[in-house]
Amino acid sequence: MACVDNDVIEEVRCCRPMTAYVLGCRLRVEVKIEPTGEWLWAEYDNMTVESENNKYTLHVTGYHGNAGDAFNDDHAVNWQSNGMPFSTPDVDNDENPKANCGRKYGWWYKKCSSSRLNGRSVWYSAPKKPPSTIKVSFSRMMMQCGVGNY
């Protein structure tokens, strides 16, 4: 897996149908937790980010890892990020009628999920007993595209 920035994502978008920004990639999220410094990971076998016209909606499937599936298991169904468009301070795409969940940090919010890696970072960890939100001191999201997906 390689780390990618927006320029690389733009290159990927240019080569794909306009219905998706990123299509059929693997996603790995790594989080370094406070205060222990331990690294945890969540990997998804398939990730799609839809086009700008579809508000960069995120779809992930095939979770495995030890950090918890924060995109699908975030406290309750009404907080899950999977299948949600991207919200930012200036574009409110979440389903919270009372607030813009992305008012400070852009993310795929449904109703202000507890998982986000932009700004004050946290990651929801369902495998922990009891489930908890992990404070994150460092994180990275990596994609691998075009390997056996086409």
Image (cartoon, helix red, strand yellow):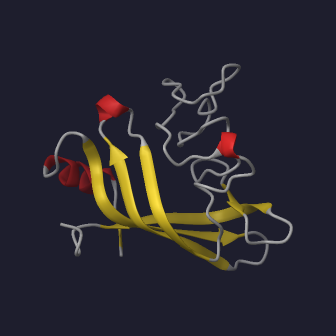
| Image quadrant assignment for residue 96 | top right
**As displayed, is residue 121 above or below residue 93?**
below
Q: Provide residue 122's location: percent of width, then percent of height.
A: 69, 56
Examine the rendering and report whether any part of residue 113 can be seen: no
Residue 104 in the figure: left or right of residue 35:
left
Is the N terminus in the top left, top right, bottom left or bottom right quadrant? bottom left
Q: Provide residue 64's location: percent of width, then percent of height.
A: 54, 74
Q: Provide residue 92's location: percent of width, then percent of height.
A: 53, 25
Task: Find the residue positioned furthest to the right.
Answer: 130
| Image quadrant assignment for residue 20 | top left
**As displayed, is residue 145 above or below residue 94?**
below
Is the C terminus in the top left, top right, bottom left or bottom right quadrant? bottom left
At 68% from the left and 23% from the top, the residue drawn is 99
Near-viewer residue (144 or 103): 144
**As displayed, is residue 104 above or below residue 71?**
above
Near-viewer residue (94 or 33): 94
Examine the rendering and report whether any part of residue 123 can be seen: yes
Q: Provide residue 105's location: percent of width, then percent of height.
A: 58, 39
At 68% from the left and 63% from the top, the residue drawn is 136
Task: Find the residue positioned furthest to the left.
Answer: 15
Near-viewer residue (134 or 73): 73
At 57% from the left and 30% from the top, the residue drawn is 94
Looking at the rendered structure, the number of numbered marks drawn on it comes to 0
Residue 120 in the figure: left or right of residue 19:
right
Near-viewer residue (20 or 31): 20
**As displayed, is residue 24 above or below residue 99?**
below
At 34% from the left and 56% from the top, the residue drawn is 5
